[in-house]
Image (cartoon, rainbow, N blue to C red):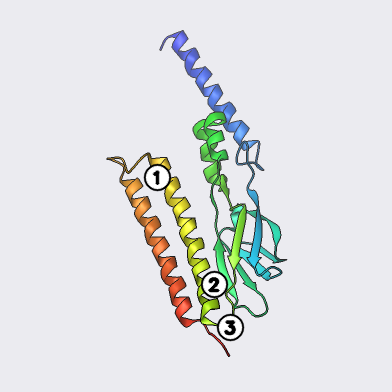
């Protein structure tokens, strides 16, 4: 190896060590530009429901609507809400990759991403979470159907947005050689249909009158 080649290798090594040192010097960040906590605004129908949140080494009790700071290490978080005249309702809050992970591709390169993975960083809870509690009883079949038709419409809108985002990321249609795109769309449709089936099952079992 020539002197010039050896000097270039040393420069690259110093750069690599500098990036690693920067990532490790910021333990409260993910790992360079984002932290591990995220705020979630929790709302329910009806309002003023009492919600208990339980996760890994994490417990909170709030009255809705309310904002809660959630550490990513607590995921997944179970949220159980109750209100007078409504059935107790439970859902799960989980994290997703946030946009700051791409900041590390610019600032920290592979090392930055590796530090993120080691810390569980780059993951965020959704900024807003809505939960609709099911009435214990409906006054009439019309009231029942209005309620469940609304639930079905909300599910349809949600999965339409998700599938539109998937199609946008994959380009128009499903490109040849991208089985992950087709698989993602099929999975989204399957999950949507499961939620539809759950709604119809609850509709058929709902108490009316009395």
Tag 1, which secondary structure? helix
Tag 3 near tag 1, CB within 8 Å? no
Placement of 97 over or under 210, stated as above or below:
above
Direction from residue 35 to residue 94 in the image, left or right: left
Task: Decide which of tag 2 and tag 3 comes sooner along the chain.
Answer: 3
Q: Quadrant of residue 24?
A: top right
Q: Residues within 10 Å of mark 1 (few under 14, many from 20)?
A: some
- Near-viewer residue (66 or 156): 156
- Near-viewer residue (163 or 79): 163
User: Which residue position is annotated with label 3?
Assistant: 139
User: Which residue position is annotated with label 2?
Assistant: 147
Tag 2 near tag 3, CB within 8 Å? no
Give the residue displayed 60% in from the left and 39% down from the top: 31
User: Which residue position is annotated with label 1?
Assistant: 167
Task: Decide which of tag 1 and tag 2 comes sooner along the chain.
Answer: 2
Direction from residue 180 to residue 70 in the image, left or right: right
């Amino acid at each position: 190896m020539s002197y010039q080649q050896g000097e270039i290798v040393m420069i690259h090594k110093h750069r690599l060590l500098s990036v690693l040192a920067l990532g490790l010097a910021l333990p409260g960040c993910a790992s360079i530009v984002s932290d591990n906590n995220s705020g979630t605004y929790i709302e329910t129908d009806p309002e003023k429901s009492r919600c208990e949140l339980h996760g890994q080494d994490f417990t909170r009790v709030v009255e809705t609507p309310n904002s809660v700071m959630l550490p990513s290490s607590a995921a997944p978080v179970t949220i159980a809400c109750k209100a007078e005249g409504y059935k107790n309702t439970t859902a799960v809050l989980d994290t997703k990759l946030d946009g700051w992970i791409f900041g590390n591709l610019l600032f920290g390169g592979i090392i930055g991403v590796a530090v993120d993975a080691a810390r569980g960083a780059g993951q965020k809870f959704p900024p807003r979470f809505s939960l609709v509690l099911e009435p214990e009883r409906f006054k009439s079949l019309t009231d029942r159907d209005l309620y469940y038709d609304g639930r079905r419409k909300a599910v349809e809108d949600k999965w339409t947005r998700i599938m539109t985002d998937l199609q946008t990321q994959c380009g128009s249609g499903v490109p040849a050689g991208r089985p992950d795109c087709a698989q993602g769309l099929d999975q989204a449709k399957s999950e949507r249909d499961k939620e539809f089936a759950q709604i119809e099952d609850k509709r058929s079992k709902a108490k009316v009158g009395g």
